Amino acid sequence: MQTKTFETEVGGKKLIAEFTDLAEQASGSVILRYGNTAVLATAVISSKTRDDIDYFPLTVDYEERFYAAGQILGNRFMRREGRPSDQAILSGRVVDRTIRPLFPQHIRNEVQVVITVLALDEEDPDTISVNAASLALATSDISWNGPVASVRLGKKGSGDFIINPTYAERGETTLDILACGKDSTINMIEVAAKEAGEADVAAGFALAAAEHDKILAWQHSIIKELGKTKRDSSAPELPTALTELYAAEFETAMDAAVFCGKPNKDAIHELADRWSARIKETEALKDFSKGAAKRFFEDKVDESIHRGAVEHNKRADNRAFDQLRPLFAKAGGVSPILHGSGIFYRGGTHVFTALTLGGPGDSQVVDTMEEHDIKKRFMHHYNFPPYSSGETGRMGGINRRATGHGALAEKALSAVIPDANTFPYTIRLVSECLASNGSTSMGSVCASTLALMDGGVPIKAPVAGIAMGLMLSLNYAQDKKYKVLTDIQGPEDEFGDMDFKVAGTKDGITAIQMDIKLDGIPVEILVEALEGAKKARLQILDVITNEIAATRDHISPRAPEILTMHVRPDQIGLVIGGGGKTINGIRDVTLVEDITIEDDGSIFITGKNGSAGKAKEMIEALVKEYKAGEMYDGEVTRMMDFGAFVKIGPSKDAEGLVHVSEVAPFRIEKVGDALKVGDRVRVMVKEIDEKGRINLSIKAADPEFAARKGLVASTAPARPFTPHARS
């Protein structure tokens, strides 16, 4: 086995790259270790060219392995890895979104990058995976404009940033930034925050870029020693007939189509159809690739929209650069069946979100390589049917894009979701993107806020989101000109340089996600985009709060009722009973939907039509601790010479002794003269003795009992009370 090892230090820990011949058939591979976490990254390019497609065919697969966590996971019937978890999909997207912009986009050979997690400890594998993919690609013969670096930063309150925090440290942070980039610029961002200020986020971006440069210097030294010669990836020469056809018939029409003032791409599509038709009709181009012709046309759209923005201060729909499209918000009103709903419009992007509330038992159990038996009580799911973009297509299932967009909105809202003690419900939001023209994910955040408030969920504050865009000058390297765009749509979304999504409350940021089509964006431009996003966010929040000023003070009557109570941990077994007999009996009698008992003794009872209250009463009676002076109606269960036992509650311990001396205000000879098994009597708790036994009194609770029974005083000598005689 041939091995070459390189190491550096990041955040106080060693980052070790090991190059071996383990995956020698791959175009490039590396095992990257950080702490005790290790990933294998491989990169392969196909020898065949796909001329039938008009896009760069890159696939990134992120492979979780249960052995990496040192556990046999799965379920009892399936002890091997199955479909990728949501976390694996999101981790793969982080790698994909970072490396994709750095490939020559005209390549039509399939490229596959596979990340396999070999060992997992307290270090986050996402940042390691990006750096590993970078080294695998950069040392291979695959054409790629890397390397690129990744770092995660955590910040708790006003403290300093932690570089690559552990899982435990991340759980305590109020700002979490995952940023990737190269050459002091950033090209991929994921942020989760608890209403962080723009200044803190900007400081994080600057620190991330500085850390990137250190990692990149290390990567460059490795590439210099091990890097293979890159295969030729020059763009094919364009036929003269193609450029002449465009100049003669389409160049003038292009600007008119792009800047037609309509909030969609219909004019561009019409021109594209004419272009395709003319390609077919032109004899000199009959053998030219349709995909290449389409790519050429799209490049011209790209040039037109950039030139218009930077040189002529024009947007495709004639808005100002900081202007939002028309907004509309509606809370509720769809159907009383729903527990809550929201509708949000931002121009041509229309999203409907439905809220469903359930009990703690409805929470999702997450059991993956990274998380074990985690109960997830807040979920946001995202659907993007083909009709939303005016197309036909396959319905059903879930894809990586839907998973990613749903997770982004969930992250944006998580910061304001009340904790289980405040609001013990399981919360599920489903956003249906019914019309799409730019950033449905941020539209989902807004519609979800409306649904939560309509449904009576006491969120900490409303959340809104906006997508910011960027147009760099076609000659940016020389003139440094650019335009930041608020609320990108249509061609700006498809052909712009940046999709910078920012969500938050009026007080701060809760989530950011950025994708770009460039090698990287300077931090100062991102800071400008943050300020533009804040201004837009506040405008959207005004529209939302004008529709519904505060969370409704009640939940839907169709939502289940959840009652909470607490018992001592040593009473849990009493509530559950042998083999679950007691708790199942309560369920059967009361018809509650669910009873969830936590290890600390917290009990959540979910039901409808008063069933939860009945179950709570039964449990309270089971665990009740009796006190002297309390009154009860009980049933005589056993008779003894010295008294009678009376059951005053449902638990086996809720039975007390009425000594013969406590039946009447005078001495009676036989307790049987006054009581028999099955009698219902009023009793008072006289005392709880040192052994926890209950002593009861009828005469103290019901002074007239003896008279009603016709009892007379006994003349026989009194017998002393002997507690040891109790059974």
Image (cartoon, rainbow, N blue to C red):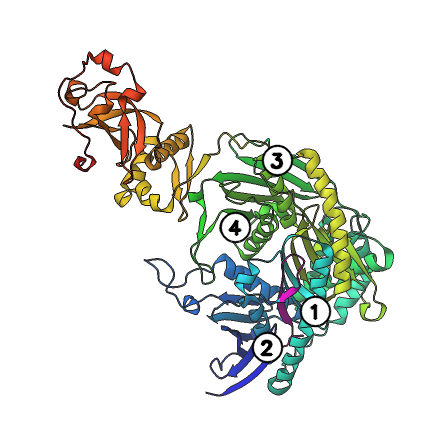
Q: Which of marks 4 and 1 is in front?
A: 1
Bounds of the magenta segment: 140-162
The residue shown at (34%, 37%) is 623
Q: Is residue 245 above or below residue 377?
A: below
Amino acid found under the numbered disc labelled 4: Arg
1 and 3 marks in contact (CB < 8 Å): no
Inspect the magenta stretch and tell me whether residue 37 lies in it: no
Task: Specify the label residue 394 is tagged with.
Answer: 4
Disc 1 target residue: 209
Along the line of sight, which residue is nearer the eye, 171 or 396? Answer: 171
479 to 450, vertically: above or below: below
Camera-nearest residue between 524 and 85: 524
Q: In this view, does 79 lie to the left or right of 213?
A: left
Work out how far the residue at label 4 is from the one at label 2, CA to CA, in angstroms.
37 Å
Q: Are marks 3 and 2 in contact (CB under 8 Å)?
A: no
Q: Which of marks 2 and 1 is in front?
A: 1
Disc 4 on helix, strand or loop? loop
Which amino acid type is marked by label 2?
A: Leu
- How far apart marks 1 and 3 lie (CA) works out to 40 Å
Return the x and y of residue 123 as percentages of the image width and height: 53, 68
Residue assigned mark 3: 551
Distance, label 3 to label 2, CA atoms, is 50 Å
* Cα gap from disc 2 to disc 1, whole angstroms: 18 Å
Spatial CA distance of label 4 from label 1 is 41 Å
Residue type at the position of mark 1: Ala
Secondary structure mainly formed by the magenta segment: loop
Q: Using the image, determine if residue 457 lies above or below residue 35.
A: above
- What residue does disc 2 label? 135
The one nearer the camera, 106 or 549, is: 549
SS category of the residue bearing label 2: helix
Residue 240 x %, y %: 77, 71
